[in-house]
C-alpha cells in the first residue's frame, strides 16, 4: 500500500523520482526502492511529510486526504519519535 500511495503522491506533485529524491537529500535509487516496497526509516517519512505536506495517514493506509490541508492539520496528532526508533501504529475503526 505505501509504495503505491507514495508513487501516487509523487505523480500528483508532478515530480520525477530523481526530483523527489533530491528534495529530501537521498539518491534516486534509494527513493525508487520505496516505490517498489522497501520500508523507509522514520527519518525519511518525516522528510516526505515536511517537504511535500503529504498526509501520513494517506501514505500508510490510503485513507484520507493525500495532502495536509489547513482543515486537516487541526485534527492531526503531532509527536516526535527518536531517530532509529521502530513504531507500530494501529488505526482504530
Image (tube, helix red, strand yellow):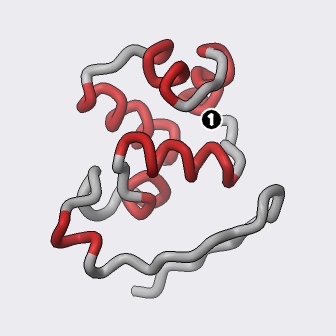
**Quick one: which residue is furthest to the left in this view?**
71
User: Toward the viewer: 31 or 23?
Assistant: 23
Residue 16's x, y, as percent?
A: 39, 14
Residue at x-position 62% and y-position 35%: 37
Residue at x-position 63% and y-position 71%: 80
Q: Could you tell whether 68 is left or right of 43 in the image?
A: left
Q: Could you tell whether 39 is left or right of 47 in the image?
A: right
User: Toward the viewer: 80 or 54?
Assistant: 80
Q: In this view, does 86 lie above or below 21?
A: below
Residue 61's x, y, as percent?
A: 44, 60
User: Toward the viewer: 23 or 14?
Assistant: 23
The image quadrant that residue 82 belongs to is: bottom right
Residue 55's x, y, as percent?
A: 36, 57
Q: In this view, does 76 lie above or below 58?
A: below
Residue at x-position 57% and y-position 76%: 79
- The local secondary structure at tag 1 comes to loop
The image quadrant that residue 65 belongs to is: bottom left
Q: Name the residue under label 1.
A: 37
Q: Is residue 2 above or below residue 31?
A: below
Q: In which quarter of the image is the C terminus?
A: bottom left
Residue 56's x, y, as percent?
A: 44, 59
Q: Could you tell whether 91 is left or right of 55 in the image?
A: right
**10 Å neighbourhood of mark 1: few (<14), some, or many (≥20)?**
few
User: Toward the viewer: 79 or 7?
Assistant: 79
Amino acid at each position: 500500500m505505501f509504495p503505491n500511495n507514495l508513487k501516487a503522491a509523487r505523480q500528483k506533485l508532478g515530480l520525477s523520482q530523481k526530483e523527489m529524491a533530491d528534495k529530501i537529500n537521498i539518491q534516486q535509487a534509494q527513493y525508487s526502492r520505496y516505490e517498489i516496497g522497501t520500508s523507509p526509516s522514520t527519518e525519511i517519512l518525516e522528510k516526505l511529510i515536511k517537504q511535500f505536506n503529504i498526509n501520513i495517514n494517506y501514505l500508510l493506509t490510503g485513507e484520507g486526504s493525500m495532502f495536509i490541508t489547513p482543515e486537516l492539520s487541526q485534527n492531526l496528532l503531532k509527536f516526535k519519535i527518536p531517530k532509529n526508533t521502530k513504531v507500530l501504529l494501529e488505526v482504530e475503526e
